[in-house]
Amino acid sequence: MAITGSKRLTGKKTIGVWLKRKYIDKKTKEQIETIAAKMSKVERFRESISEHAKEMKEIRSGQDRLRDNLQALGSTTEEAKLRERYVSALDGQETRLAELQAAIDKDKAARAKVEKEAAKAVKALKFSAMF
């Protein structure tokens, strides 16, 4: 079960106001802050995954251009040097793509773990209104 939108949960300032007005007790405040912190962490993982995916897309676009350039090359000495340069660039990009994919996989696993922790904390949240 994925929990989304820590911003929808609330901010520390609002939680503080709830405590001050006695809408919640200190224990509930701490539980809500814990949940909000976990959801903030989830959001950071989502942003990281999105940034990595964006970089991968840009690299792949550049690779398409390099492949087109490789196909257009002939067999002169100068073109052989360019071919070598393009192949080297493609190799570097493939290495970077592998690194980015590994980072995405790691972030997805970490995000799933924190989402489960947050869901568990939400289920454990118990309070009674103090109106």
Image (spheres, rainbow, N blue to C red):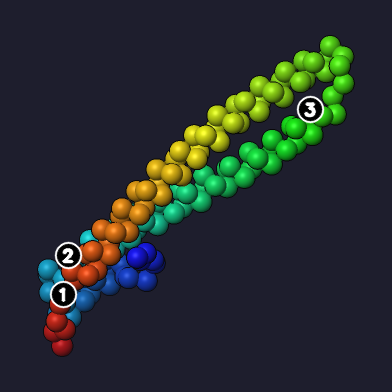
Residue 99 location (% of width, % of height): 49, 34
Residue 64 location (% of width, % of height): 73, 38
Residue topped by disc 3: 70
- Mark 1 residue type: Lys
Viewer can see residue 123? yes
Q: Quadrant of residue 55?
A: top right
Residue topped by disc 2: 30
Which quadrant is home to the N terminus?
bottom left
- Mark 3 residue type: Leu
**Mark 3 vs mark 2: which is more N-terminal?**
2
Crowding near the residue tagged with mark 3, few <14, some 14–19, many ≥20 C-alpha atoms within 10 Å? some
Above or below 45: residue 129: below
For the residues carrying marks 2 and 1, which lies nearer the camera in this image?
Answer: 1
Q: Quadrant of residue 3?
A: bottom left
Above or below 117: residue 107: above
Looking at the image, which residue is at 50% across and 40% down? 101
- Separation of residues labelled 2 and 1 (CA atoms): 12 Å
Looking at the image, which residue is at 69% across and 23% down? 87
Nearer-the-camera pick, 21 or 3: 3
Left or right of 121, for residue 91? right
Left or right of 24, for residue 71? right
Looking at the image, which residue is at 76% across and 20% down? 83
- Separation of residues labelled 1 and 3 (CA atoms): 64 Å
Crowding near the residue tagged with mark 2, few <14, some 14–19, many ≥20 C-alpha atoms within 10 Å? few
Above or below 21: residue 39: above
**Mark 2 vs mark 1: which is more N-terminal?**
2
Left or right of 5, for residue 21? left
- Asked if the residue at tag 2 contacts the one at tag 3, i.e. Cβ–Cβ closer than 8 Å, the answer is no
Which quadrant is home to the C terminus?
bottom left
Viewer can see residue 20? no
Residue topped by disc 1: 126
**Mark 1 vs mark 3: which is more N-terminal?**
3
